[in-house]
Image: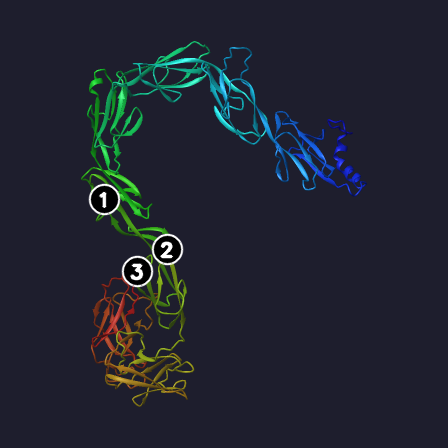
Amino acid sequence: MNTFTESGIPRRLHRGAWLLAAAFALCLPAQDALVMTRISATAADALFRVDGQAFRGAAVFTWPAGTKHTLEIAASQDTPFSGGRYILVGWSSPLGPLGSTSNIVTISADPKIPWYRADLTTEYAISLNFYQCAAAPCVSPGTVWVNRVAYQQNADVWVAAGSTVTLEACPNPGFVFTGWSQGPDKAAIYSFVLNAAITVYPQFTVARQVQLLTSPDGLQVLADRAPVTAPVTLDWGLNTAHSLAAVSPQFDKQGRQWVFRSWSDGGNLSHTYQVGPATTPISVVAQFVPAVPVALLTNPGGLRLTVDGLDGVSPQFFSWGPGETHTVTAPLHQTDSAGGPWAFREWSSGPASTQIVQVTDGQVGTGLRMTAAYDPLSRIRVESTPSGLPLAVDGAGCLTPCEVERAVGSAVRVAAPASVGVSEGVRLDFGSWEGTDGGTFTALAGYRKIAARYQWSYLLALSTSPARAGSWRLAPASGDGFYPAGSPVSIGIDAASGMQFRQWGQDLNGSANPATLVMNAPHTVQAFLDRLPETPPPPRIGNAAGETPTPAVAPGSIASLYGTGLSDETASSLADPLPQSLAGVTLVCSGRLLPLLYVSPQQINFQVPGDLKPGKYSVELHRGNAPVVEVEFEAARNAPGLLAATHLDGTPISPDSPARPGEPITLYGTGLGPYQPMPLDGFRVPATPSFVLVDPVRVLLQGCDVSPDLATAAAGVVGVAAVQVRIPEDLDLSVPATVVVQAGDVSSNALPLPLK
């Protein structure tokens, strides 16, 4: 479908006009030069004319060089959309603006000037819609300013697109401005950027005159939070709400002080006033009365007081009106700005901490002065480093930090635990007090702070592998294994017998002994030790009865040689005489072969030569091709050792066959000393004659000294003595009994003796 220009030519033909012109130019004679010229407007939908023909946006023409043409565009034209228009700035070419500022210009086709353009600006309309004067006289409700230009009634104001617009609404007398149609959040003056046409509805309404008065005259009140001096008349909109407040207290021009009493509308000192729908003027009166100056003090100054429920610091000053009632309270306990505690004593007007004050006319000239007196207390703050530790103040728990109050001069005791466990291997140890020389002190007036200083301590856990393989050397030593944080500890270990230190483990490395470890945390140290190859103990000779008080052996007694590898086999002999070689083993002492009773790899029992004198001797052990082993021993006249205890019938005394008080028993031992006569070495003692012990023999039975009935060599054996003794009748059978034999003042081993 074709659209047409204002000249009636189809629009699509105008768009292709330059193509037809170009094609037509190819048919012209070569001597006629043609020029292609583009004509446009900066607005794509703006209308312009070329040689009387209408175009929109842009058009390209082919003209003979030097031909004259007319360009025309309206100085102002509406945009296709409502509320906008284009304003001509002027025509321009590649060389800049044309010299003529007219909307109609004449040009010549020139190949050096390829285009001409109409430069336009866009404007939008701001439509003001608030009052239209139909007939004079006109009474506009207000003035609307648009970018500082005043308008008293409806108008369309054209403003360049993209510019900032400032609107201001000013009500005329008898009216008030209530807002813009754009929303209640818009102030009476506001700005915006104009990007489209807009209609603005300033809203004005009829005002009511409200006269604000005071009694006495000339005092100030607050109208909508702004101070005004009465009398004053304000224009307030009908059915609108406003804030009214009295300034109290205040001074008049003569320097007299006044306090608010009441509003004529019955409102509070500060209240909302609702303007009624009537248009007649109205008055609102604030009633004031002479003020009573009030001073509320504390002794000492600077303490808190509560006046009519509000806390404040003294001194506090007020202006109260006669007839008013006020409540003043002094806290029973409080602290000053330095932390010092105080206890209430009394008011200057009475002992009660809360006073009800009735203000009278008689106080207008004199004023009112009240003082709350306080007595000092001792306020003590107990802290610790770190905090949160369980201390005690006068026996009561105190989780630090805590505060207590005490009477001045009283004794205060603060106890701090020596140690506080924190976690496994971690604890806090008390170090010192700060703020006091000790835990007990005298409470002084004011504020005092004391602190218990603790230090971190860590556990040093020690172990050996294998267990009990050595003894520790620590410097410094610790009674419980804890050390202060950061302290160095020298750690060493002495290996037990048969063990050798190898290295450290856990939190200590290396093999240096001792080594140093810093206690910056709980530490565990383990010492690894190795067993040394076992060294057999050196061979030794002792009493055949076992361990006795004396290490010596007596001549003629039975002795034992202890060691390792003493023989290759075990053998014993009861031959008479005893053999001098048994299982390939012989013993030689002082050039003599010794009688042998028993031979094994670990023990050899033999008879000591009976004619040895007291002194040092050695025994040589000969065994086949093995090296000769030489063992030293000491011979003593008396070296008794008990072997056994029997009934007279020869049966052993045992728990199953105990001895009885008054019963004669036989004790068998060896080493009790020489006999008279002396038996032959290696031969069994014959039954007759009797071989009596030469040295005195005593029997100690459960502490009782009992003389034996008989002390001789035991018949039928070699090197054994028999001592017969009667058990006392008065022995305490509840105590386990032992028996000891003394020969020549030398005691034997103790032999258990079951009794019944």
- Disc ID at residue 478: 3
Measured Cα–Cα span from mark 3 to mark 1 = 30 Å
Per the image, the residue denoted by label 2 is 425
Q: Which image quadrant: the N terminus?
A: top right
Which residue matches tag 1? 413
Where residue 115 sits: x, y (%)? 67, 38
Colour pattern of the rendering = rainbow
- Per the image, label 2 sits on a secondary structure element best described as loop
Alpha carbon separation for disc pair 2 and 3:
14 Å
Q: Is residue 732 above or below residue 609?
A: above
**Residue at the far bottom in the pictured view:** 591
Circles 2 and 3: CB atoms closer than 8 Å: no
Q: Is residue 407 visible?
A: yes
Q: Residue furthest right?
A: 27
Q: Would you say residue 682 is visible in this rendering?
A: no
- Residue that sits furthest to the left in the current view: 409
Q: Which amino acid, mark 1?
A: Arg
Rendering coords of residue 348 (x, y %): 19, 25
Q: Secondary structure at mark 3?
A: loop
Q: Is residue 167 left or right of residue 359?
A: right
Task: Report the residue at 55% width, 18% height from top.
Answer: 154
**Residue 743, percent from left and from top:** 22, 76
* Dot 1 alpha-carbon crowd within 10 angstroms: few under 14, some 14 to 19, many 20 or more: some
Ranked by sequence position, the earlier of labels 3 and 1 is: 1
- Residue type at mark 2: give it: Gly
* Mark 1–mark 2 distance (CA, rounded to whole Å): 30 Å
Contact between marks 3 and 1 (CB within 8 A): the answer is no
